[in-house]
Image (cartoon, grey):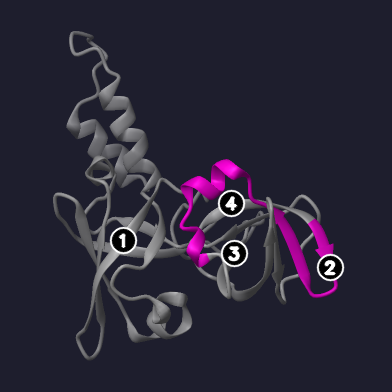
């Protein structure tokens, strides 16, 4: 489990086959889970200046691989007792989105991201979303896109400073929205046990 708060911008040394080698200050151990651009990956080798992870062909087909070069966001998995500052992130990327526009408002940046419309039900206005591992809040949701607002600090301290129109990004939608949508889609409408929207709101309020 992760929080969506980037701990370090690390350097990609190489990607050979399924092995992604990273130069980082973080001292990893074999078997550690580390989110790299939002994807939970397993450390298979430790070196003096970083570590290597396994990136399967299936993962390479799903992820925005053009961002796995030069610099990447990394976040080690949470440890018991860590302060929880972002939101609940699994490191399971749902889809790749495309940045359509970044608008500089002076004291903030509006970022518009397009996704396959089948993922829109899992993206909630004022809810949480993870973009390349960064925990962010959704402002508006449209038929096949959504709008985020970044403060200058986030823009400066993350790889968003390098993104522009057409950039691809890994997206993990809100876990609780996915679970609720799954429950609702598999219910028997004639069942007395059907979950009501009041119950859905009650579940969401707990988090």
Q: Which residue is mark 2?
A: 47
Asked which secondary structure carries label 3, the reply is: strand
Highlighted magenta segment, given as a residue range: 45-67
Residue 40 - label: 4
Q: How many marks?
A: 4
Nearer the observer, disc 2 or disc 4?
Answer: 2
Asked which secondary structure carries label 1, the reply is: strand
- Camera-side residue of 17 and 167: 17
- Left or right of 125: which side holds 158? right
The x and y percentages for residue 16 are 70, 58
Asked which secondary structure carries label 4, the reply is: strand
Quarter where residue 161 is shown? bottom left
Nearer the observer, disc 3 or disc 1?
Answer: 1
Asked if the residue under mark 1 is in contact with the one under mark 4, i.e. CB atoms within 8 Å, the reply is no
Label 4 vs 3, first from the N-terminus? 4
Asked if the residue under mark 4 is in contact with the one under mark 2, i.e. CB atoms within 8 Å, the reply is no
Q: Residue at x 27, y 52 (%)?
A: 115
What is the distance, in whole Å, between disc 2 and disc 4 at their CAs?
19 Å
Decide whether residue 124 is among the magenta residues: no
Q: Which residue is mark 3?
A: 75
* Residue positioned most to the bottom: 106
Asked which secondary structure carries label 2, the reply is: strand
What is the distance, in whole Å, between disc 4 and disc 1 at their CAs?
21 Å
- Left or right of 133: which side holds 48? right
The x and y percentages for residue 183 are 32, 26
Nearer the observer, disc 4 or disc 3?
Answer: 4
Note whether 167 is above or below 123 in the view shown: below
């Amino acid at each position: 489990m992760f929080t969506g708060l980037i701990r370090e911008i690390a350097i990609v040394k190489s990607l050979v086959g399924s092995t992604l080698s990273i130069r980082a200050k973080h001292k990893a151990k074999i078997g550690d889970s580390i989110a790299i651009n939002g994807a939970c990956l397993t450390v298979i080798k430790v070196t003096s200046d970083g570590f290597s992870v396994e990136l399967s062909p299936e993962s390479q087909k799903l992820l925005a691989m053009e961002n796995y070069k030069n610099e990447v966001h990394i976040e080690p998995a949470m440890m018991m007792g860590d302060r929880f500052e972002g939101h609940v992130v699994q490191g399971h990327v749902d889809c790749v989105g495309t940045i359509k526009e970044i608008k500089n408002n002076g004291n903030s940046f509006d970022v518009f991201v397009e996704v396959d419309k089948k993922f829109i039900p899992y993206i909630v206005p004022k809810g949480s979303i993870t973009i390349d591992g960064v925990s962010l809040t959704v402002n508006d949701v449209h038929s096949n896109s959504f709008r985020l607002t970044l403060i200058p600090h986030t823009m400066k301290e993350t790889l968003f400073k390098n993104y522009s129109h057409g950039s691809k990004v890994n997206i993990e939608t809100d876990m609780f929205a996915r679970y609720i949508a799954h429950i609702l889609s598999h219910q028997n409408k004639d069942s007395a046990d059907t979950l009501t929207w009041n119950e859905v709101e009650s579940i969401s309020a707990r988090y």
